[in-house]
Amino acid sequence: KVHFGSIVKLEIGGEKKLQEFQIVGVDEADLKKGKIAFTSPIARLLMNKTIGESVNLKLGKGERMIKIMDIE
């Protein structure tokens, strides 16, 4: 399951290239380094989910499907 400190590999919007993020504290968050705050909308959606699960992230008027491909 995704939790604080997890490194997650995500398929975003059906793109072939996976994106990797670590869920960290607010003071450690740095998107350029792949570190997202546990308070961020995407991290809150991912918490307690498992490999293979998908979530929908609302972005303005649209939304993106995010699928969890791996968790470390």
Image: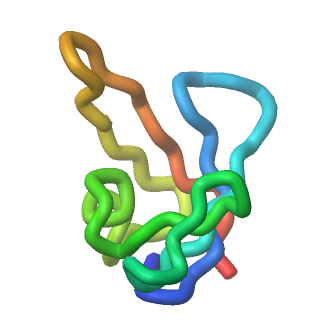
Pick the quarter of the image with the N terminus: bottom left
Quadrant that contains the C terminus: bottom right
Residue lying farthest to the top in this orientation: 61
- The residue at 43%/87% (across/down) is 4
Examine the rendered structure and indicate whether residue 19 appears above or below residue 49: above
**Quadrant of residue 40 in the image?**
bottom left
Q: Which residue is more in the foreground, 71 or 30?
A: 30
Q: Quadrant of residue 65?
A: top left
In this figure, what is the number of numbered marks?
A: 0
Residue drawn at x 45%, y 77% is 2
Asked if 61 appears above or below 41 in the picture, the reply is above
Closer-to-camera residue (10/40): 40
Residue at figure coordinates x 51%, y 45% from the top left: 67
In depth, the one of 40 and 17 nearer the eye is: 40
Question: Residue 14 at what x, y percent from top left?
Answer: 60, 23
In terms of depth relative to the viewer, which is nearer, 65 or 44? 44
> Where residue 18 sits: x, y (%)?
74, 43
